[in-house]
C-alpha cells in the first residue's frame, strides 16, 4: 500500500508536492509473482476517478498528474 502509480509519496503531498503518473511495470511484475494480496490506490483516484478504467484499457498515457487540490476538495 502506498504511492502506487504516482512518482511522489503521500506525505510529501501535504507539503504541496505534485506527482506524475509512474510506470506500473514493477508493480505488475510483483503482483504476478504473488507479492501482494491487495493493492490500494488513493490519491490517483481522488485526482482521476477514471484511473482504474484507463489502466484496465491500457490508456496509461491519459493518466493525470496529481495535484494537492484533489485532497482539499474532500473537506
Ligand atoms: C485523503 C486521504 C486521507 C488519508 N488518511 C489516512 C489516515 O488517516 N491514516 C493513514 O495511515 N493513511 C492515510 N492516508 C494514506 C493512505 O492510506 C495511503 O497510504 C496513501 O494515500 C498512499 O497511497 P496513494 O499514493 O495511492 O495515495 C490517507 C490518504 C488520503 C489521500
Image (spheres, rainbow, N blue to C red):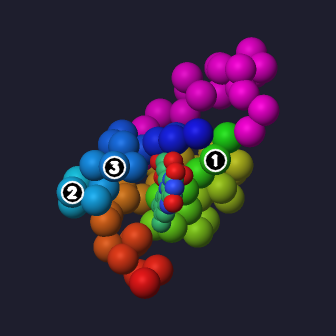
Name the residue nearer the viewer: 33 or 15.
15
Q: Which type of secondary structure does the marked residue at label 3 adopt?
A: helix
Q: Residue at x 59, y 28 (%)?
A: 27
Q: CA distance from mark 3 to mark 2?
A: 7 Å
Q: Earlier in the sequence, mark 1 or mark 2?
A: 2
| Magenta residues, start to end | 20-38
Q: Give the SS element for disc 1.
A: loop
Q: Which residue is mark 1?
A: 40
Say which quadrant the C terminus sits in: bottom left
Label 3: few (<14), some (14–19) or many (≥20) C-alpha neighbours in 10 Å: few
Left or right of 42 on screen, residue 70: left
In the image, residue 40 sits, relative to residue 68, either above or below, namely above
Rendered location of residue 47, percent (x, y): 46, 66
Determine whether, in the image, residue 71 is placed left or right of residue 51.
Answer: left
Mark 3 or mark 1, earlier in chain = 3
**Is residue 48 among the parts visible in the rendering?**
no
Estimate the x, y position of residue 3 in percent, counting from the top left. Answer: 47, 42
Q: Is mark 3 within 8 Å of ligand 1?
A: no
Residue 69 among magenta residues: no
Q: Residues within 10 Å of mark 1 (few under 14, many from 20)?
A: few
Q: How much space separates mark 3 and mark 1, taking CA atoms?
A: 16 Å
Q: What separation in Å lies between label 1 and label 2 (alpha carbons)? A: 22 Å
57 above or below 3? Answer: below
Residue labelled with disc 3: 11
Q: Is the CB–ligand 1 distance for label 1 below 8 Å? A: yes
Is there CB contact under 8 Å for labels 3 and 2?
yes
Local packing at callout 2 (Cα closer than 10 Å; few below 14, some 14-19, many 20+) is few
Give the residue at mark 2: 15
Instruction: Identify the residue at image location x=55%, y=62%.
Output: 45
Residue at the image position 70 percent from the left and 49 percent from the top: 56
Amino acid at each position: 500500500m502506498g504511492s502506487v502509480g504516482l512518482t511522489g509519496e503521500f506525505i510529501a503531498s501535504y507539503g504541496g508536492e505534485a506527482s506524475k503518473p509512474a510506470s506500473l511495470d514493477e508493480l505488475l511484475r510483483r503482483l504476478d509473482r504473488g507479492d501482494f494480496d491487495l493493492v490500494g490506490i488513493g490519491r490517483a483516484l481522488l485526482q482521476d476517478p477514471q484511473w482504474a478504467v484507463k489502466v484496465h484499457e491500457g490508456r496509461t498515457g491519459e493518466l493525470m498528474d496529481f495535484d494537492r487540490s484533489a485532497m482539499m476538495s474532500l473537506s
